[in-house]
Image (spheres, helix red, strand yellow):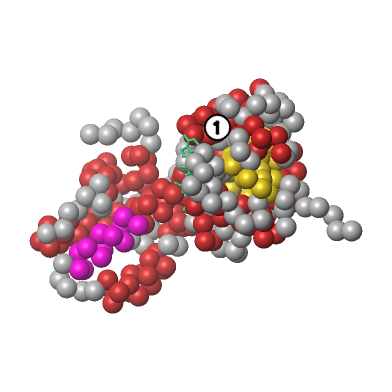
Amino acid sequence: MTEQLPPTTVLGLGSMGSALAEALITAGHPTTVWNRSATRPEPRGSTRAATVPDAVAATDLVLICLLDHGSVRDVLGTAGPLNGKTIVNLTSCTPAQARDLAAWATERGAAYLDGGIMAVPPMIATPAAFILYSGSQAAFDQARPVLDRFGESHYLGTDPGSAALYDLSLLSGMYGLLAGILHAYAVVGSEGVAAVSFAPLLTRWLTTMVGFAASAAEQIDRGDYSVGVVSNLAMQSAGFPELLELAEHSGISPELIAPLGPLMARRVADGHGHEDLTGVIELLKKGADHE
Ligand SMILES: NC(=O)c1ccc[n+]([C@@H]2O[C@H](COP(=O)([O-])OP(=O)(O)OC[C@H]3O[C@@H](n4cnc5c(N)ncnc54)[C@H](OP(=O)(O)O)[C@@H]3O)[C@@H](O)[C@H]2O)c1
């Protein structure tokens, strides 16, 4: 007789919740699902619970993937007894919200694990997906055979806020990159260059320059921005206005990239022109003079 895989409940059948539930069903886990509105179809092979208490009572392990922190609090507030449950919240939230929810769940006798999904729904259960977890180590160890169905699991420690901190910081890096990509297409497009013809060069350039993440990290951890400088800040700051001039000349709003210019200029004015761009991070820290 084959051993039954851990049964799991998934609260939320939006794009991501459905992808998670489908990954579990495909792997053979008995899966109970619940969604606020009945209009979302349940994945084939799952058992639909009529109410949140029914869904939570069905299994010891409860995964939550709803819109935001407020919806998670609303739903869990109606869940009934949580004693002995393991709750894995895969809803995006801030570190403070994750810590708040962990305290709330722990007071009610549940083990709490927070998760940050670094994937879009079609990537779930493929090698491209990785998921950050933090909170109860026991909950992570117990849930791991289930969690590994979604992608590579990274446990960041017992602070329930860590996964959200890493998640939102990774998204911040992504949005900075995406903002630059949109600006580049807008500018080049203003002279009739098709985005598809520019894309290979943009991809090649960004793929090369993404190495900045690793080299900047070493300078930032040392707090020394003058080691290994090949493109000093004074030179970069002198050239940056050309980007803004081009945007203006092209009729393109510079608002996605403009904020970096004054920060570079201030850092140069403060006597750091011989250093790397990395030193601009000092101006972002609380207490730095934001004129
Ligand atoms: N999609 C992605 O690419 C992606 C990637 C990484 C992380 N995430 C995170 O995954 C979470 C879910 O995203 P998604 O793409 O699945 O969103 P979605 O498709 O918009 O689904 C939202 C889900 O939340 C439910 N919901 C919203 N407000 C609610 C409330 N007050 N009470 C109960 N249920 C409520 C919706 O129920 P109804 O059907 O009743 O409206 C639906 O099940 C988000 O936190 C998102 O940041 C998503």
Q: Is residue 118 visible?
A: no
Q: Is residue 208 visible?
A: yes
Mark 1 C-beta closer than 8 Å to ligand 1: yes
Which residue is found at the position 52% from the left and 39% from the top?
Answer: 36
- Vertical relation: 30 (above or below) 103: below
Q: Position of residue 98 (x, y in %)?
A: 55, 33
Q: Position of residue 62 (x, y in %)?
A: 66, 40
Question: Judging from the image, what secondary structure is the residue with disc 1 in?
Answer: helix
Q: Residue 233, located in which quarter of the rendered image?
A: bottom left
How packed is label 1: few (under 14 Cα within 10 Å), some, or many (20 or more)? Answer: some
Q: Position of residue 271 (x, y in %)?
A: 28, 44
Start-end of magenta stretch: 178-189
Which residue is found at the position 59% from the left and 42% from the top?
Answer: 34
**Residue type (three-letter) at the residue carrying disc 1:** Val
Residues 281 and 110: in front is: 110
| Residue 35 placement, left or right of 269 | right
Q: Position of residue 52 (x, y in %)?
A: 61, 34
Name the residue carrying label 1.
75
Q: Main secondary structure of the magenta part?
A: helix
What count of labels does the image hold? 1
- The single residue placed furthest to the top in the displayed view is 107
- Vertical relation: 114 (above or below) 124: above
Which residue is found at the position 45% from the left and 56% from the top?
Answer: 213
- Vertical relation: 121 (above or below) 73: below
